[in-house]
Amino acid sequence: MANAPFIWIMLSAGSGLLGAVLLRQAWRRRREPHRIPVVLGWLALVAATLAWLPVNLPVYGLVLGLLVIECVALAVVFWRSGWSGPAPAEPKRPAAAAPARAWRTGLRGFAVTLLAGPVALAGAVVLSMILFALAGQAGWNEADRLSLFLFAVPLVWTLLATLAVIDLRLRLRSLSLVAPLLLGGGLLALIA
Amino acid sequence: MTSLPWPKMPARFVARMLAGHTALGLALSALLYLVCLSGTLVVFHNEFSRWEQPVVAESGDVTPQSLQALLDNVLARFDETPERVTLVLPTEDVPRLVAGAGEHDYWLADADGTLGEPVAHEFSEFLVTLHMYLHLPSTLGITLVGLLGVMMLGLVLSGFLAHPRIFRDAFQFRRTKSARLGETDLHNRLSVWAAPFHITIALTGALLGLATIGAYALALVFHDGDYTEVFPPIFGEEAATGPAPDGVADVATAYSTLLAERPDLHPWLIYVNGPGTGEQGIEILTQVPGQLAYFDEVQFDAAGNMLGSTGMSDGETGQQMAAAVYSLHFGWFGGQPVKFAYLVLGLALTAVCASGFTLWLIKRREKGRPSARLERAWIAVVWGSPAVLAATMLGALSGVMSEAVLIPFHWIALAGLVVLAAATGSGRIWSRALRLGAGVLTLAGLAVHHAAYAGEFRGEAAWGVSLGLAVTALLLIASVRPWRFVTARRQTSEVSRAG
């Protein structure tokens, strides 16, 4: 049927809009029981995404479906609230005392930058190379394991960088970043 | 009260995550903002490049014979035969025939293969190099942009972990109650609803940026330092080649063969390697309609016989994943509707970057540690960036600035604005002045463009970009509410007259 893709796209857009509206209604009535609209809303969003599957290849359809949902949902969020411009600034409170030992804060900042930047990057590359080597030993073809490596580097770096900046003791953070780097380097030297 | 499925997290963990989220965001906010803003514009790179040369005849028609003639005409333009000649075929996005070699020597061509005026779209190229390299040397620049992608991915991750109620409050938008609540809601709502887009853009951007140094590391450990051995499993190797029967590679036969043998692929770029030498080869890069793959590649020998394809669109899973990265990052896979969706979501991402830093400034002020200089400097980054981009566009279009001047002008002007704003004035005045400046400069650029080309536009892209820029300029000017100044002035003069 020539119109089939068009029908699926319309169904997806309708379902996406319905999902966003239902979730908004649930949120507006959040002080009352609202399990049903929440569940129905999320189901409608899932259906809106899946409706793209028959339109074309699965991945392509999913991506297009997600794009539609995101745009529809943003429209629903801002439609009722409008854009009234920035609110007036709050009156200033009395100035708080400046934190003591600024130089120490600066040094900590520098150490955290080193951890989240070069150390986490090196760790990400080493751990991704271990994945690359293990995938080769598991019989993956070259293209697949190279792709795994390329995706793994930013993902692992993200995890390590996040670990580096969260509010834990600096020693603990350093240890949890440097240890995998050293261990991974050693392991890599063995398997590469 | 029902809560949405999101794990309950200890308050201490949430506080730690929030601290991490803030630290990551503050570290590179200005660069992240610039990359997001320029990336949103780069989605329309093809349209901008057509707009910059709007009087070129556009056509989708080429014949095998005209391509062969085009190759001969390009080779005749060079004193020394280039190592590779590139023929860019008309596509739906850019219905123009272009040919040339190297980095800068390219010409537009007629459908019969006759070379015309040189390709000249300085501003579009300026935007692309800003987004991809921040105008730095290539490896350094793309790695820094990759780092920004990682930071963005980290911000998404830590942001969700730091805000356990982010889904429950998915529609909360208190724009008028207080500056902090409004900014928080703007930041969180855009972050929630556009999260799949943010993750996609950050991950693909980080991957594109870090692929080079990752490949160097792989080469060092697994390929005895030979970098050229890393990527062929995905992108294929250059085909074995030989001399052409008639001296120059038979592009016409290769093109005809591709159309006959692979009707599923749309030819896009033709590379002729080693033209005229004993080691010639032809690679035809194609678009793959209805798929996420940015391209596939079919290889031919110098006589135009098909050797095979690399399988980017139908080969190994890893190849198909790698081929999709570029399309997903730039929104170049579903025509104009997808580009407009990327425009909306890209602006949302840019707003998230801006509001994140603004939130931190507001919280600082509320804690009694206001930083007026930093607040003004941030306003100069947020609104100065579009103003300086508009000034750069005006300089490029009017011919006042040569290509070599655009980049230094952009960075010096932006840095100057930030320093000036930090030193003097009020935040409100800077914000208004820069928005007004961005709007007026954009309109001035449009005026220059229309003065040069009015009445000679060919192709809808020229009209589309002009319309888009005009609407943007008017919105920027309207956001200042200039009619308030007029009313205020009238009231002041009436009061003074009455007095």
Image (cartoon, rainbow, N blue to C red):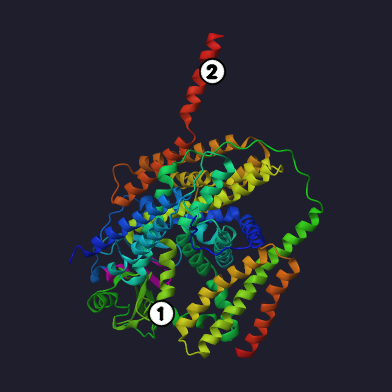
In the image, what residue occupies the spot 61% across and 59% down? B21
**Residue B414 horizontal/vertical position (percent):** 58, 47
Please state which of residues B450 and A116 is positioned toward the viewer in this rendering.
A116
Q: Which residue is mark 1?
A: B317
Please state which of residues B48 and B324 is positioned toward the viewer in this rendering.
B324
Range of residues picked out in magenta: B67-87
Which amino acid, mark 2? Thr
Numbered marks: total = 2
For the residue carrying disc 2, how many other residues have a C-alpha within 10 Å: few (<14), some (14-19), or many (20+)? few
**Residue B60 horizontal/vertical position (percent):** 25, 61
Please state which of residues A136 and A62 is positioned toward the viewer in this rendering.
A62
User: Residue B262 appears in which quarter of the rendering?
Assistant: bottom left
Q: CA distance from mark 2 to mark 1?
A: 70 Å
For the residue labelled by badge 2, is the local secondary structure a helix, a strand or a loop?
Answer: helix
For the residue labelled by badge 1, is the local secondary structure a helix, a strand or a loop?
Answer: helix
Chain assignment, label 2: B
Q: Which residue is mark 2?
A: B492
Would residue B393 be found to the left or right of residue B154 on screen? Answer: left
Q: Is residue B288 magenta?
A: no
Q: Quadrant of the C terminus of chain B?
A: top right
In the image, what residue occupies the spot 59% across and 52% down? B30
Would residue B492 be found to the left or right of residue B93 on screen? Answer: right
In the depicted structure, whether residue B324 falls above or below residue A6: below
User: Residue A124 appears in which quarter of the rendering?
Assistant: bottom right
Chain assignment, label 1: B
In the depicted structure, whether residue B357 falls above or below residue A145: above
**Residue A107 horizontal/vertical position (percent):** 77, 60
